Amino acid sequence: MGQTKPKIAISACLLGDEVRFNGGHKRSELCTERLAEHVELLGVCPEVAIGMGTPREPIRLVGDIAAPSAVGTVHRELDVSAPLRDYGKHMAAQLPGISGYIFMQKSPSCGLYRVKVYQANGLPAPGGGRGLYAAAFCAEHPDLPVEEEGRLNDPVLRENFLSRVYAYADWQELLQRGLTLHRLTSFHARYKYLLLATNPDQYRALGKLLGSLNKHNLAEIAPCYFSALMVALQRCATRGTHSNVLQHISGYLKQTLTSEEKAEMQQLIEQYRRGYVPLVVPLTLLKHHFLLHPDRYISQQVYLQPHPANLSLRNAL
């Protein structure tokens, strides 16, 4: 991980800004207190930005679930579909340095999942859709880690999202330093065990992709590699895949640990696999052993610390 804080765009109401249709906010303690210490949060409210006042008439999505319109709930002639979509494209160009985006759930402008789209019969369509601003923004940045604030209350989704944010920031840093064959292959090597914990098949597929890499196709293959990496990291690791990775990494200590230390390590990994202890327990012991018996390859593995330790994200896994 780099030394600079990753930038994350966020729905302004989640920061406590009074920009909601009713003049209120939806301040998120998780974002404003726990995350703000480690990332730079950039607040955005598309509805205020396109000139809708505060307080204002609420809007809702209507029509085709794949391409809905955003209209007023009282004055149906109020249609802000085009302004919201245009502003999404505008902000996608204005925020190239962000490494993630946290959206307000259920919002007709910012919601990512299951936003109500009302049909002619007055009832919402099954499954729901995506807010118009969020849809336009995400279409411009398909690799960007995005999540809804409400879903971040799930510890597995929260850890997964922030792992992806820091991976994205890591890639941005690599591009700033300059893309080379060596830097790309080294990047992939550092992400080996994080990928094996989330998507082992994709790790092997990415390895094959890089096997065809040379100085002539670097500019073509690198974006394809990164897009595939970000898709792979979207899959949440399980106790089973984490346990397999812990076993793999502990294998690097087989020449240095005593039989008692090996037994203790195996016992903690098994306790974690069965759900008796959180991931941080076997991981802490593993890190302790590698402090005493350093291994250059393992020390470079992102898996051991994909995000700041003070976030304590793995204490709840």
Image (cartoon, rainbow, N blue to C red):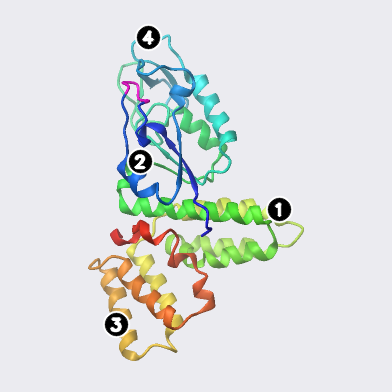
Q: CA distance from mark 3 to mark 2?
A: 38 Å
Give the dominant element type of the magenta stretch: helix, strand or loop. Answer: loop
Residue corresponding to mark 1: 219
Q: Which segment is the magenta one? A: 19-23
Between discs 4 and 1, the one toward the N terminus: 4
**Residue 20 belongs to the span the image colors magenta:** yes
User: Residue at the spot x=33%, y=86% of the render?
Assistant: 261
Callout in the foreground (2, 1): 2
The secondary element bearing badge 2 is classed as loop
Q: At label 1, which amino acid type do we have? A: Ala
Between discs 4 and 3, the one toward the N terminus: 4
Quadrant placement of the C terminus = bottom left
Between discs 2 and 4, the one toward the N terminus: 4
Residue corresponding to mark 4: 75
Q: At label 3, which amino acid type do we have? A: Glu
Q: CA distance from mark 4 to mark 1?
A: 50 Å
Q: CA distance from mark 2 to mark 1?
A: 35 Å
Residue corresponding to mark 2: 149
User: Residue at the spot x=43%, y=78% of the render?
Assistant: 291
**In the depicted structure, whether residue 267 falls above or below residue 220:** below
